[in-house]
Amino acid sequence: MKAFCKRPIRWALFFLFVLFIVSTVLAGLKDFDLSFHPEKEITFVQNGWTITGSLHLPEGVPAPPVVILVHGDGPQDRYANGAYLPLINFLLDEGFAVFSLDKPGVGKSTGLWLSQSMEERAHLSLKALNTLREIDDFNNSIIGFIGFSQAGWVLPEIAIQGSAADFFILIGAAIDWMDQGAYFTQKRLEAEGASEEEIARALNDFELDVNRLSDPKLTYQDYMADQSGDTDFSKERFGFVRRNLTANSEEALSLTSAPFLVLHGAQDLNVDAVSDHRRFRDLLGSRNPATDFHLIENATHGLLNTDLFNYQLPSHMPFWSEWAYLALGRDAYADGVLEIMGDWIKARAASQPAAIQK
């Protein structure tokens, strides 16, 4: 009789568990759906290229703060192949408008992103900001940027141009291009199980390669002739690396008084988060009282939860990790990091008398 009584209880508990899992997955999947918010397609011309992106608006919020997303490396479309969607939905729920564009040559944008220097990327991002400022709905709005990874060499270039933007948020940014490349190489080899001697040799080869790429007389054909094994290092990528090899944000950061929120994941495999975070503190100093810094524990390069998502590149993620991201949505981020961003932007809006908050 006791066993019979326990059986319905077990089934009830099993049903509740299944219901919990299903509701969690559905909540996560909702974060990948932007159809609940108004959208405007924005197009402008920069250096003869037609650049296109999407402006998403929060419901019922007059003159909302506007966030412009600035991509990291790679052929990113406006949603970074869907990776941005949970963040965008969070920002919309906080009452912010969000704009993100297709990189030149990706999606609906013409041109070639690999032909850009970091300074040219800054000009493109600034053109996006000025285009949004021409929209009547944003006459009384603050407008700023959230930049990922490589955008750490883009946003400081904008910041030194005065009061063009009202705020800057950096996620997983490095100070020096070559330092970041060496760190990335070391962490990649560690993950592959390389010995200390193998890593030391690889880092020495990396330094020699950097010196060779710095030679203005080096041609793509000469460079590739010395490469062993298969490589997908295209001529366009060769030009991109050569154009940006000396990128370093020290000077720009030491000159700007703009408000920055600098966020690093403590377990970053792409950027030396501890070292670069300290360098950002030293360079930005206390020139703007709103500037803030957070080194987030249990967070990746993109501020996702380390336990499930700590991979150097999206292509490294196993299928189960991709499914976990779809199931979790915004909950895939490290604890509290989205709230840090949302609260900081609201504080910037509150400091502007003309801005209207949610």
Image (cartoon, helix red, strand yellow):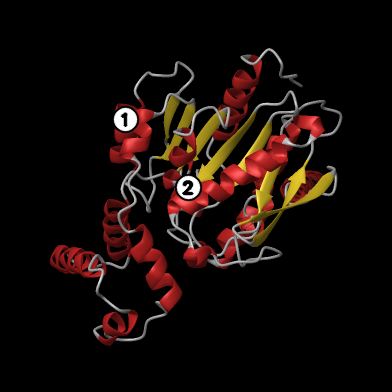
> Looking at the image, which residue is at 63% across and 66% down?
106
Give the class, few, some or many, for how many residues have Cα within 10 Å of label 2's Cα (few <14, many ≥20).
Answer: many
Res 112 → quadrant: bottom right
Left or right of residue 356: residue 72: left
Per the image, label 1 sits on a secondary structure element best described as helix
> Looking at the image, which residue is at 33% across and 43% down?
175
| Residue annotated with mark 2 | 151
Per the image, label 2 sits on a secondary structure element best described as helix
> Looking at the image, which residue is at 82% across and 25% down?
62
| Residue annotated with mark 1 | 283
Q: Which is more N-terminal, label 2 or label 1?
A: 2
Q: As rendered, which of 180 and 185 lies closer to the eye?
A: 180
> In the rendered structure, which amino acid carries the disc numbered 2?
Ala
> In the rendered structure, which amino acid carries the disc numbered 1?
Leu
Q: Above or below — where is 144 with respect to 29?
A: above
Give the class, few, some or many, for how many residues have Cα within 10 Å of label 1's Cα (few <14, many ≥20).
Answer: some
